[in-house]
Amino acid sequence: MSIPQLDIDGLEVQTYRGVTDDAAGHAIQNTGIAASPSGPDGGTGPGGIGNYQVTGHRNSATAIFLRLPELERGDEVLVTAGETVYVYRIATTRITSFRSERSLREQRAAVPGRPGVRATRAMITISTCRTQEDHAEGNFWADELDNPEHRIDKIGVLVRTRPA
């Protein structure tokens, strides 16, 4: 994965069976790479119809997504898989709450933010913690995996592909 706007180039993304920010995903993120959940409750793969979900640490393990909040509407994310580069364009930002099952369902939905809606196009959700902002607001809640209450999700849509 490459995000030119954030000076990220060639970030490894490891797929695993699970959901965003579970113990298996944390173990992957702790190695300094990004994690992509798949399976019945996870997302699709690069270029697949639905929600390609990628999570990474912001504050530890090389802080790969330290600057993710800077990503803006229109910025591009490039994902290379096999012989293809998938180019996604960021469309929106949403905040996910770990204390809300509804919010988690929205993050993990095939159409981000719209659980139960059938996906008709390829999308991406890139997610990282909102620890700094939560702490600045006096919110120090964390779950058993030390996830803060909120996540920052950058959501994009596939706009084109090209040969790798």
Image (tube, grey):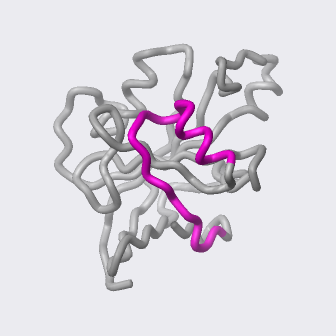
Is residue 96 one of those drawn in magenta? no
Asked whether, in this view, residue 52 is left or right of residue 23, the answer is left
Q: Is residue 73 above or below residue 102?
A: below
Asked whether, in this view, residue 137 is left or right of residue 16, the answer is right
Q: In the displayed orientation, state which residue is furthest to the bottom.
A: 163
Q: Is residue 118 above or below residue 13?
A: above
| Quadrant hosting residue 43 | top left
Q: Is residue 5 above or below residue 73?
A: below
Residue 71, percent across and down?
60, 56
| Quadrant hosting residue 2 | bottom right
Q: Is residue 143 above or below residue 116?
A: above
Nearer to me, 101 or 41: 41
Residue 112, percent across and down?
35, 38
Is residue 19 one of those drawn in magenta? yes
Q: Residue at x 55, y 14 (%)?
A: 99
Residue 102, percent across and down?
40, 17
Magenta residues?
8-30
Q: Residue at x 65, y 48 (%)?
A: 69
| Quadrant hosting residue 4 | bottom right
Q: Residue at x 66, y 18 (%)?
A: 144
Counting every numbered tag in the picture gives 0
Q: Residue at x 68, y 46 (%)?
A: 30
Asked whether, in this view, residue 78 is left or right of residue 128, the answer is left
Residue 73, percent across and down?
50, 55
Viewport quadrant of the C terminus: bottom left
